Amino acid sequence: MLTPQAFDVFAATAATPGPRMDTFDNRLNLLHAQEPPLVPGLPGDGHLANRMTLRQILLAGLDKAVHYGARLTRYDAIAAGAARSTMAVTPPKRRQPYGRPRIP
């Protein structure tokens, strides 16, 4: 569940789906048009969310708890609906400076 402040950000950045879904090419020529059926009871009352914005909302305040660059090596079911994961952190690869050939 989102906090009231986080929900306000979500609501301010969400959109209501239009009656038609169009697909265009790189010259903005219409390639395909579709009128999807209305689906009652969609989560969020059918609002569309920008995935990156929603990700930022969900990760807000978790800077010290969320880490990137690890590989899942194992997981164990510990209770109904719960799991314990084991992660392995891979050190970053050294990069060669630009302009210098890489010699094996």
Image (cartoon, helix red, strand yellow):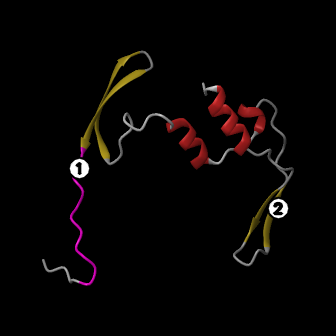
Label 2 to label 1, Cα distance in Å? 45 Å
Identify the mark at residue 7; answer none if there is no mark. Answer: none
Query: Is residue 52 magenta-colored?
Result: no
Q: Residue furthest left?
A: 104
Above or below — where is 15 with respect to 21? above
Is residue 63 something that shows in the picture? yes
For the stretch drawn in magenta, the main secondary structure is: loop
The residue carrying pointer 1 sits among few (fewer than 14), some (14 to 19) or many (20 or more) residues within 10 Å by Cα, namely: few
Which residue is at a point 67% across and 38% down the rendered structure image? Answer: 10
Q: Amino acid at mark 1?
A: Thr
Is residue 48 something that shows in the picture? no
Mark with earlier residue (2, 1):
2
Pick whichever, 92 or 33, lies toward us. 92
Q: Amino acid at mark 2?
A: Ala
Pick whichever, 86 or 93, lies toward us. 93
**Residue topped by disc 1:** 90
> Over which residues does the magenta segment extend?
89-99
Above or below — where is 25 with respect to 4? below
Please provide percent x and percent y for residue 96. 22, 73
Whether residue 79 sits left or right of residue 39 in the image: it is left
- For mark 1, give the secondary structure: loop
**Residue topped by disc 2:** 33
The residue carrying pointer 2 sits among few (fewer than 14), some (14 to 19) or many (20 or more) residues within 10 Å by Cα, namely: few
Whether residue 33 sits left or right of residue 48 in the image: it is right
Q: How many marks can you see?
A: 2
- For mark 2, give the secondary structure: strand
Above or below — where is 34 with respect to 100? above
